[in-house]
Image (cartoon, rainbow, N blue to C red):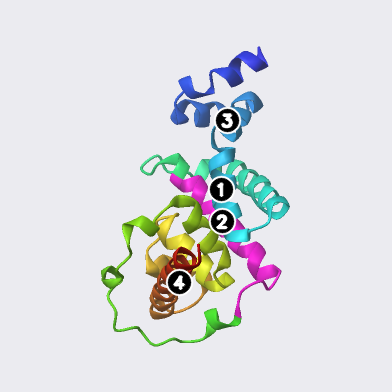
């Protein structure tokens, strides 16, 4: 029966799974876990860059989510709510481990460049090359870049999460984009 439920996890709506979880039905909590664990791991890993720590963050995130499931408001998508918990948990791990780069706490001047002014040759935009370029970014640039681009956070949200100013978030994001372009162009010229 358990295996059959897990195989049909996608056939049951989030609302139904949540309702059953709130009734303390562990099978349905497990179904939520299996439905969202990979997605949450990707978010945690992008922030933490360590597989084992990201797995721990995901585990902690689900525990928090289940403990606070009564607080979930159905007016927002459940995956979005769970991702926020995962991002917060991952960022808290970084803070505890003091893995933030110092310049995140420094005020930075805004660049005169608008976000859309970066001219990126479309031939450079190959997924693997971009992933490798992101890995070469300093931790602070990478974190802000990934929170903005992959997690879809606004600069004001990033600033709140990281306890920096919004202008610092914008500046670090622009610098990350510039650095990625430099890395891609360098690798294209050397490759």
- How busy is the neighbourhood of tag 2: few (under 14 within 10 Å), some, or many (20 plus)? many
Residue 60 horizontal side relative to residue 172, left or right? right
* Residue 46 circle label: 2
Is residue 92 within the magenta segment?
yes
Which of discs 1 and 3 lies nearer the camera? The answer is 1
Q: CA distance from mark 2 to mark 3?
A: 29 Å
x, y percent for residue 31 = 59, 28
Residue on which the image places disc 3: 21
Q: CA distance from mark 1 to mark 4?
A: 20 Å
Do labels 1 and 4 touch, CB within 8 Å? Answer: no
The residue drawn where x is 55% and y is 73% is: 140
The residue drawn where x is 47% and y is 20% is: 11
Is residue 15 within the magenta segment?
no
The residue drawn where x is 63% and y is 47% is: 58
Q: CA distance from mark 2 to mark 4?
A: 15 Å
Do labels 1 and 3 touch, CB within 8 Å? Answer: no
Residue on which the image places disc 4: 176
């Amino acid at each position: 029966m358990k295996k059959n439920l897990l195989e049909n996890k996608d056939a049951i709506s989030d609302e139904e799974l949540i309702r059953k979880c709130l009734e303390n039905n562990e099978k349905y909590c497990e179904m939520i876990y299996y439905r969202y664990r990979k997605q949450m791991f990707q978010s945690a890993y992008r922030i933490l860059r360590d597989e084992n720590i990201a797995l721990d963050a995901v585990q902690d995130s689900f525990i928090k989510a289940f403990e606070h499931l009564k607080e979930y408001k159905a007016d927002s998508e459940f995956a979005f709510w769970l991702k926020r918990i995962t991002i917060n948990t991952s960022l808290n791990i970084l803070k505890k481990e003091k893995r933030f780069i110092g310049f995140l706490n420094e005020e930075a001047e805004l660049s005169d460049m608008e976000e859309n002014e970066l001219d990126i040759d479309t031939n450079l935009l190959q997924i693997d090359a971009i992933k490798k370029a992101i890995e070469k970014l300093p931790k602070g640039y990478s974190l802000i870049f990934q929170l903005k681009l992959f997690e879809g956070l606004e600069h004001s949200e990033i600033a709140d999460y990281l306890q920096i100013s919004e202008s610092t978030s914008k500046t670090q994001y622009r610098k990350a984009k510039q650095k990625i372009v430099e890395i891609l162009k360098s690798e294209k010229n050397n490759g």
